[in-house]
Amino acid sequence: MSGNPYQDDRGNKDRSITKDGGGTLVASPGTKEAVHSSNAFLIGDTMSGGYGQGPDILHDCTIAVNPGEIAVIVGPNGAGKSTAMKAVFGMLDVRKGSVRLDGEDITDLTPQARVLKGMGFVPQTSNIFPSLTVEENLEMGAYTREDDFRETMEQVYTLFPILRDKRRQAAGELSGGQRQQVAVGRALMTRPKVLMLDEPTAGVSPIVMDELFDRIIEVSRTGIPILMVEQNARQALEIADRGYVLVQGRNAHTGTGKDLLADPEVRRSFLGG
């Protein structure tokens, strides 16, 4: 890969994918056709589970994303959004259901093993090494690689030009939005097959949020599937190829970002009318 890969136009493709056994997710009432699940590149399929010996937080929850897509998980506080993300990444027990990546069942793999399989995960907090420089943070992202990663680092600097300017500065001295860029950049240094972002715009200004969303769109244009949890539901659904509205750990509404934004019930219950 040469030059800047974060190019090429991307539309809302609304790809359909079939679930094993022919099942489908429940579509939002305003959606013209159900969003199917499961020959997806990444899928958490009918997941139920929770933390340790505690009760289930997820209940038959399904989320999926394909190459080139942005899939967004939204819902009220306590709906299980970040829990669903962590379940896909292996950070809690999936007691029922499965997680599959590129056709392979990875349900029993540790998070570390999933990274080696190609999953890039950016948690909401504690997602940088504040005492290390920006460039050292990016180098840490390449710790599993044995090849020359300088080209990937150049691609990250092209995507986030401010990081090139601040590459010798301690990451902990950056603004909130810049620290998020470092976190995403470090995940991209692994050359992930799929990128997972847990509330990437938390605590940043609306202007910075828009800039981060623009960069996320650019990453998706390279074909990397992006699965994202967001509190800023309206703005996230505007860039989403598919959206999942969770309520109490269950799928409440599923559809394209466009369809969910147009659904009167979704607008009334989750988007402020």
Image: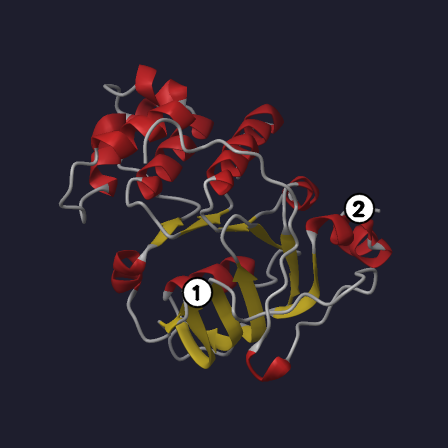
Toward the viewer: 62 or 14? 14
Whether residue 133 is visible to the viewer of this picture, yes or no, is: no
Task: Give the x, y percent position of residue 204.
Answer: 53, 31
Name above or below for residue 237 compared with residue 31. Answer: above
Q: Left or right: 214 with respect to 196?
A: right
- Residue type at tag 2: Gly
Q: Kindly identify which residue carries mark 2.
A: 272
Q: Nearer the viewer, residue 252 or 8?
A: 8
Q: CA distance from mark 2 to mark 1?
A: 29 Å
Q: Inspect the image, locate mark 1, and give the three-letter code of the amino acid beneath it.
A: Val
Q: Secondary structure at mark 1?
A: helix
Residue at horizontal 54 percent and vertical 51 percent from the top? 229
Residue 107 makes an appearance in the image: yes
In the image, taking residue 23 as reference, residue 112 lies left or right, namely left
Tell me if 171 is positioned left or right of 208 in this view: left
Q: Nearer the viewer, residue 106 or 124?
A: 106
